[in-house]
Amino acid sequence: MLKQIGLSLFLGAVAVFSYAPFHIWPLALVSFAGLLWLIADKPKKRAMLLGLSWGVGYFSAGVHWVYISIKQYGEVPTPVAIIILGLLVVYLALYPMLFAWLLRAGDRFATKFSLKQLVLLAPILWQITEFLRGYILTGFAWLELGYSQLDSPLRGYFPIVGINGVTLLLTMCCGLSVYCLYRLTHLSFKKHIFGAIIALFAIIVAPISFNLINWTTIDHSRSANFTLIQGNILQSLRWTNEQLNKTLNTYASLTEKNWGKDNIIIWSEASITDYEINQQPFLHYLDNEARANGSEIAVGIIDYHIADNGYQINPDIYNTLMVLGEKTPYQYPNANRYQKHHLVPFGEFTPFAFLLDPIADLLDIPMSSMQAGAEKQPRLTMKGFKFTTAICYEVILSNLMWKNFAPDTDFLLTVSNDAWFGDSIGPKQHLQMAQARALEFGRPMIRSTNTGITAIIDHHGYIIEQLPQFQTKVLNYTLSPTVGLTPYARFGELPYYIIISLLFILLFVKKRP
């Protein structure tokens, strides 16, 4: 049993190499198929243990970079940081454990190593447990298996069924592979094995033809001149009083060199590390300069009302991206702004505060008492172009972006501050998820960050231009929007729901006697 636990840990950990920055996409199939092979015929308790150990390996390797923000910026002792990271990993591993238990508890519907178990029940249950992981405590939907397939033939499914659909089809491929391998190793050449091989081949080959379809086309009659400012402000200094003026000067000086007719200038998330009400003179300066130079500028800031006497008059604090330089001079609160909806637990708010405030106090993370913006908000507009916007973590939430998308959206826009995670694989994974959104919606993605990775992504999900991390630089790029709609942009999760519903129906279809 210890060997199997060690193997499951290894199989979980090896999956990290299927994501950015490694991009060895077949390892995702090996990892999940290996989990299915290990648990398909085990007793429920043993399957749970193997699912837990697979999850520990998967999340230890995949999100170990969270330690950097806990240790360096939460300013907690190393042993405490390790314990907190360990608790997070074990918590996330509970979902693969639940999956394993449910799979073995489903013997009445699907016997071990059967097509029903591996190709119908397993993908359905994986989607259920992933849904729970993405929603409980506001969710942590990082590293969905489908993201690993951005460089594989399965990428052709992204514009049709989105990330959830790609994950579903990937797990079906794993189930078909395990079924075929099991039958071959047990010399059981039933007629079903040929059908399974054909189905596996079809799922992998079909999206190759989808990749040839131009769901959206470039509108060459219009173009936007983008200037992305990467300020490269150290996270350890960003929120100190001594650094504030230096930060503003850094961003302002980089911007002044790039004022120009029709320029759209984008600063990063919370690039102005202060309350909006405190920075009225600076904001009016930016607003006037942008207008005088024919530019518009989006800046990240914290929206928080404070009365003249120093007392708070509005309890709501929002992580905000706002536009300056419009025809109408800036006046707080201007309407052309986006407020982050999906907040990060402990980083931006404390879930179950009456119980967990001591943990938040221990981590001592600045600006960790925010409010969520509306789930659906008006799109930002700059120089006549319309942007569907996401701040930081929100870019991994395809359904949230779909709710804020419209057919006349020109570009996707995301701003972030990945300085929290240092020179780790975390920012690379984050960029890969932004690429998936561009591919799903068939729209170019503009990504502006504090320390990287600032990038321009085309409507096929490929990186056109990017800045190196941890350098104070500016990215200038002229880009045309796209027109038309991918099936995902048009229907959202509906195609995915249809597929998973069909699997669910087939699960309960009984074989003829």
Image (cartoon, grey):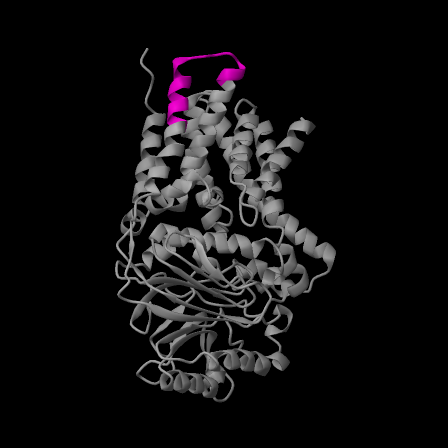
Answer with left or right where residue 331 lies relative to residue 56.
left
* Quarter of the figure with residue 379: bottom left
Residue 223: in sight, yes or no? yes
Estimate the x, y position of residue 329 in percent, counting from the top left.
34, 85
**x 35%, y 62%: residue:** 411
Residue closer to the observer: 41 or 353: 41
**x 38%, y 33%: residue:** 205
Is 386 drawn above or below residue 85 in the view shown? below
Answer with left or right where residue 248 lies relative to residue 408.
right
Residue closer to the observer: 457 or 212: 212
Determine if the magenta segment contains residue 185: yes
* Quarter of the figure with residue 471: bottom right
Is 115 drawn above or below residue 485 in the view shown? above
Determine if the magenta segment contains residue 191: yes
Quadrant for the N terminus in the image: top right
**x 45%, y 67%: residue:** 371
Residue closer to the observer: 90 or 282: 282
Quadrant for the C terminus in the image: top left
**x 49%, y 43%: residue:** 148
Magenta-drawn segment: 183-200
Residue 330: in sight, yes or no? no
Estimate the x, y position of residue 208 in percent, counting from the top left.
37, 38
